[in-house]
Image: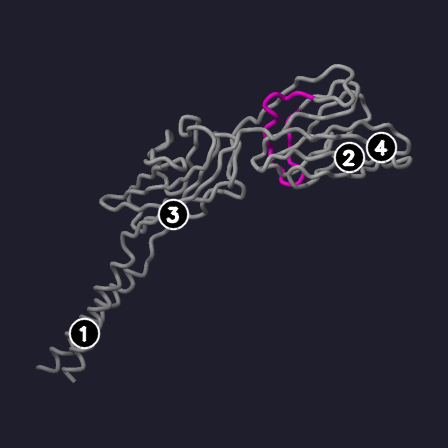
């Protein structure tokens, strides 16, 4: 009986010693994946840190351009919240290209790095649509012909329409988006009201959201307005010059340019749901410790009683 009790006590002590520390002092850091391509240096990268003891932490973000030798710390630094974000700035970047990021969390003597995420910074607008012309098919339908730009990062063409000879190519006049391969010739039929004369404007976008100059046949002034994604809802930059190419070449040309304002948050990127300051400590260590202590005292009491 005494031998069985001793074996049982050894098992209890082993569970108590080797299980409890596994729940204490664990540090981890996760960096959310930002959009794969951006057209601005002003965006946010979100992180979530976990420290099971809820000890004080410090989190920093590091960046490196592809081909560079060293990592550098971003200007926005020294975060102390368990869940938060880093705001990137122009000074963090050195021109267009692919960049890598990782976050580092420090708590006491423990340091933990996140996995590396990457994105491509592209601020160059694609070429404009070429060989554009339109024809009326019937009383309500127009057919548009055009050739997409040959840029390798080209994605789609936005088509705008108005009854007015002067209008702004923006979300209010956007009627269609057409995907095509770089350099591909396309046609698109667009219907409207009975025998109404419509004017169209076309604009090319690349994968980063940069927009080309506007191509139109409208005789009035067509403004190169802010570009709003028809399906994604993402606001993207207008062309760098914001000019309008008129076909045929008659009437005044527009020079309006509107660039994106505010912040770009990674698509689909949201702040982490786990916040250290609100994350309750696990009660398992205390439960196991208390159970082990009770069993230990009971076993010694039983052993002492048998000896008497």
Question: Label 4 belongs to which residue?
Answer: 135
Question: Label 1 belongs to which residue?
Answer: 9
Whether residue 216 is situated above or below residue 22 in the rendered picture: above
Magenta stretch prevailing secondary structure: loop
- Observer-side mark, 1 or 2, equals 2
Indicate which disc, 3 or 2, sits on the residue closer to the N terminus: 3
| Residue closest to the eye, 208 or 13 | 208
Question: Label 2 belongs to which residue?
Answer: 145
Mark 3–mark 4 CB contact (< 8 Å): no
Whether residue 247 is situated above or below residue 87 in the rendered picture: above
Disc 1 is placed on an element classified as helix
- Observer-side mark, 4 or 1, equals 4
Alpha carbon separation for disc pair 1 and 2? 85 Å
Residue 259 lies in the magenta stretch: no
Mark 3–mark 2 CB contact (< 8 Å): no
Question: Label 3 belongs to which residue?
Answer: 115
Alpha carbon separation for disc pair 1 and 3? 43 Å
Q: Report the span colored magenta.
A: 225-244
């Amino acid at each position: 009986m005494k031998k069985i009790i001793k074996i049982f006590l050894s098992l209890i002590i082993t569970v108590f010693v080797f299980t409890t520390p596994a729940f204490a002092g664990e540090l981890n850091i996760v960096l959310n994946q930002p959009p794969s391509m951006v057209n601005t240096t002003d965006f946010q990268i979100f992180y979530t840190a976990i420290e099971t003891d809820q000890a004080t932490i410090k989190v920093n973000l590091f960046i490196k351009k592809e081909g560079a030798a060293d990592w550098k710390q971003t200007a926005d630094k020294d975060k102390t919240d368990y869940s938060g974000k880093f705001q990137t700035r122009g000074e963090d970047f050195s021109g267009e290209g692919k960049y890598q990021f990782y976050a580092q969390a420090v708590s006491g003597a423990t340091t933990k790095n996140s996995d590396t995420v990457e994105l491509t910074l592209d601020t160059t607008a694609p070429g404009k649509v070429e060989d554009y012309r339109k024809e009326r098919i019937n009383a309500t339908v127009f057919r548009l012909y055009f050739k997409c730009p040959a840029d390798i990062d080209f994605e789609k063409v936005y088509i705008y329409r108005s009854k007015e000879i002067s209008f702004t190519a923006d979300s209010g006049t956007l009627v269609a988006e057409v995907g095509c391969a770089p350099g591909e010739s396309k046609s698109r039929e667009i219907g409207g009201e009975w025998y109404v004369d419509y004017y169209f404007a076309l604009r090319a976008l690349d994968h980063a959201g940069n927009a080309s100059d506007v191509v139109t046949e409208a005789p009035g002034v067509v403004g190169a307005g802010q570009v709003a994604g028809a399906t994604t809802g993402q606001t993207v930059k207008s062309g760098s010059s914001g000019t309008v190419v008129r076909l045929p070449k008659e009437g005044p040309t527009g020079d309006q340019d509107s660039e994106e304002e505010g912040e770009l948050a990674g698509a689909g990127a949201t702040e982490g749901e786990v916040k250290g300051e609100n994350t309750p400590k696990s009660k398992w260590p205390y439960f196991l410790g208390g159970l082990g202590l009770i069993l230990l005292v009971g076993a010694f009491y039983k052993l002492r009683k048998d000896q008497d």
